[in-house]
C-alpha cells in the first residue's frame, strides 16, 4: 500500500510541471547598492514586467539617483551590470522614487544584476540614511507579470530577499 501511495505522490508532483522561482536579492554597497535577479529554474522567461516597490519597507526606502533630491549625500543612477534589464518607464529613475518598474528577460539559471543607490528616510536609522541594512528593505514588495499571465507577488524578508514562485514555465 505504501509503495502505491508513494508512486501516486511522485506522479502527482511530476505532472504539475516545473516551478519557476525568481529570487530578488538586495545588497547594500558603497557607493552602489546591488539588486540581483536570479532565475532559479529551468524556464526561459521573456518579457517579464517586474516592479520593485519600497513603499512599505521598514526603512521607508527611496531610490537616490541625483545630487539634488531627497537622498542623502552619495547618489547613483540606475545601471545594468549584467543581463537583459530595461526600465519600464523611460530611461531614468527619478530621485525619491519608491517604485522601480522594469522589463526583464532571462534564461534558465541566469542571474541579472543592476546597481542604484537606495537610502532610508528614517529620522533614526541603524547605519544612518546613506547605508541600508537588509532588514530595512523588509516588507518592501516585488510583483511580476509574464506575457499577460496573472501577477505574482513577494515580500522582501529581513535578509533582503524576495522569492516569486510561478506555477510553471510560462508558455
Image (spheres, rainbow, N blue to C red):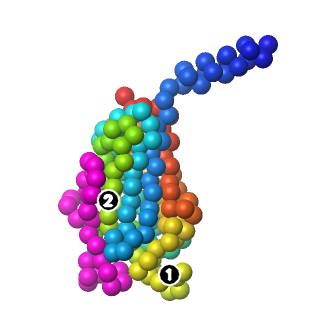
Classed neighbour count for the residue bearing mark 1: other residues with Cα under 10 Å, few (<14), some (14–19), many (≥20): few
Classed neighbour count for the residue bearing mark 2: other residues with Cα under 10 Å, few (<14), some (14–19), many (≥20): some
- Please tell me whether residue 76 belongs to the stretch shown in magenta: yes
Q: Is residue 27 visible?
A: yes
Q: Position of residue 31 (x, y in %)?
A: 33, 75
- Secondary structure beneath dot 2 equals strand
Examine the rendered structure and indicate whether residue 21 appears above or below residue 116: above
- Magenta span: predominant SS is loop
Residue at 33% across / 70% down in the picture? 32
Give the camera-side residue of 93 and 85: 85
Q: Is residue 97 visible?
A: no
Residue at 42% across / 33% down in the picture? 42
Magenta-highlighted residues: 66-92
Q: Position of residue 29 (x, y in %)?
A: 39, 71
* Disc on res. 56: none
Which is nearer the N-term, disc 2 or disc 1? Answer: 2
- Please tell me whether residue 85 belongs to the stretch shown in magenta: yes
Along the horizontal axis of the image, is 54 left or right of 2? left
Q: Quadrant of the N terminus?
A: top right
Q: Position of residue 129 (x, y in %)?
A: 44, 82
* Disc on res. 114: 2
Residue 157, quarter of picture: bottom right
Amino acid at each position: 500500500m505504501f509503495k502505491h501511495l508513494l508512486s501516486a505522490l511522485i506522479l502527482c508532483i511530476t505532472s504539475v510541471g516545473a516551478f519557476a522561482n525568481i529570487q530578488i536579492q538586495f545588497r547594500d554597497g558603497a557607493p552602489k547598492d546591488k539588486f540581483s535577479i536570479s532565475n532559479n529554474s529551468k524556464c526561459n522567461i521573456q518579457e517579464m514586467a517586474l516592479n520593485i516597490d519600497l513603499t512599505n519597507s521598514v526603512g521607508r526606502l527611496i531610490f537616490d539617483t541625483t545630487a539634488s533630491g531627497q537622498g542623502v549625500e552619495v547618489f547613483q543612477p540606475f545601471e545594468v551590470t549584467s543581463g537583459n534589464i530595461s526600465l519600464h518607464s523611460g530611461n531614468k529613475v527619478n530621485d525619491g522614487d519608491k517604485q522601480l518598474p522594469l522589463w526583464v528577460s532571462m534564461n534558465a539559471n541566469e542571474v541579472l544584476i543592476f546597481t542604484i543607490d537606495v537610502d532610508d528616510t528614517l529620522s533614526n536609522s541603524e547605519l544612518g540614511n546613506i547605508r541600508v541594512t537588509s532588514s530595512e528593505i523588509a516588507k518592501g514588495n516585488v510583483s511580476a507579470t509574464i506575457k499577460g499571465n496573472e501577477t505574482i507577488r513577494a515580500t522582501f524578508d529581513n535578509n533582503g530577499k524576495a522569492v516569486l514562485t510561478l506555477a510553471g514555465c510560462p508558455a
